[in-house]
Image (cartoon, rainbow, N blue to C red):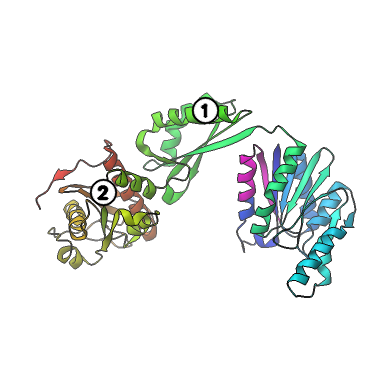
Amino acid sequence: MDVCIVSIGTELLLGQITDTNARLLAERLASAGHTSRLRVTVGDNHAQIVWALAEGLARADAVITTGGLGPTQDDITREAVAAVAGVPLERDERVAARIEAIFRDRGRPMPENNYRQALVPRGAQVIEQRKGTAPGLVVPVGSKLIACVPGVPYEAEDMVDEVLAAFAAHDPSPGVLASRVLRTWGLGESRLAELVAPRFDALWGTPTTLAFLASGIEGIKVRITTRGSDPDGVRATLDAEERTLRAILGDYVFGVDDDSLERVVARAVTGRQARVAVAESLTGGMLASRLVSVPGASAWFRGGVVAYDSAIKHEVLGVRAERVVSEAAAVEMALGAARVLGADIGVATTGVAGPDPLEGEPPGTVWIGVAIGQRAAARQVRLLGDRERVRTYAVASALDLVRLTLEGSPRGLSLEEHSA
């Protein structure tokens, strides 16, 4: 079915809270084979809610609302749904009794206004509330449905399965809607779009679509989405399109779906039964933090040296190069990290985060060094943005360069032997 999501709450419009429910609902709808046709956010205003519900029903087969089911005067979703459905609100005594029992079990007196939560549009299916006091609702409106869940995220999540079951009963053959995300690093969005453009043309008019998701420190994602009646057929379509895109993008694709650069590096390192150490200057521990965020990192990550002061580079890591923003310094830092911390692989970052130049180099100048045993090399990258962005991108660039080097990619480093 085509579904519209309506998020209700003035606090959402004011930016006081983040609307995580809409994302949850969209994800769950897609996994059940439904299409989110429209998402709308409105305040706690009867006319606005009625408009959003009517607009959603005009554009879709069903509407899901989140929020506005509480006991206070500004919780008016029930009233708006009843108005759109053209039915009165009626007190559901079973709901009222459950709310009374909740307060009784908590040893607290029940405010009279909680009985508002027992008001149900005539003909509605009530979704029992297990984690709060506001029940969910599924209300028929002609041949279409309005489903309502609370705004409290864990209460909404608890009711999604029953909403989807109601949708399935209403439309027992929604089909399968599935997506797969290819994650890339090293290409800008416009260049990526240029490379993938022929696939957009080839897929035009088919159930399969492509989309780009720019996510900053996570690179550019390419999402493949397709629909079909058979799960195996849908999976086969995703597999085939992934192979096609990988042939176009090559090793700019570093992972799929929930993969991160640090997880990919971890797999490559554990596959070699190697141990890693890092030496960081401008990134100040950010690289080590990304690596230790991977579960099980203690099996392969030895540690790091934050050599922010140049004296630490020389005295602890044995850097001989006078210029610390240089290829030679990055190589010697990587070798020094591996040597000092007893690792098989050393990774180093040095450069200029800004806002001021250093050693005549402008902000955004970064050298990344990688050492495996006594073989090492470094590469310069030029990064744009403010100080924090440069540091963040430097970490991602270092992880990607390690990945490419360990995979033996032509875009990785060609390591050279260095004397101990």
**Can the viewer see residue 17?**
yes
Q: Nearer the viewer, residue 180 or 380?
A: 180
Q: Position of residue 261 (x, y in %)?
A: 38, 47
> Which residue: 22% across, 60% down?
341
Q: Mark 2 points at which residue?
A: 274
> Which residue: 40% across, 54% down?
295
Q: Nearer the viewer, residue 138 or 358?
A: 138
Magenta residues (range):
24-42
Q: From the viewer's perspective, is the residue at label 1 or at label 2 nearer?
A: 2
Task: Give the structural element (helix, strand or loop) at label 1.
Answer: helix
- Going from the N terminus, do you reach mark 1 or mark 2 first? 1
Per the image, is 35 magenta? yes
Please state, as top left, top right, bottom left or bottom right, where the N terminus lies in the image: top right
Residue 92 position by quadrant: bottom right
Q: Position of residue 88 (x, y in %)?
A: 90, 53
Callout 2 crowding tier (Cα within 10 Å): few <14, some 14–19, many ≥20: some
Q: Name the residue under label 1.
A: 236
Q: Position of residue 419 (x, y in %)?
A: 9, 50
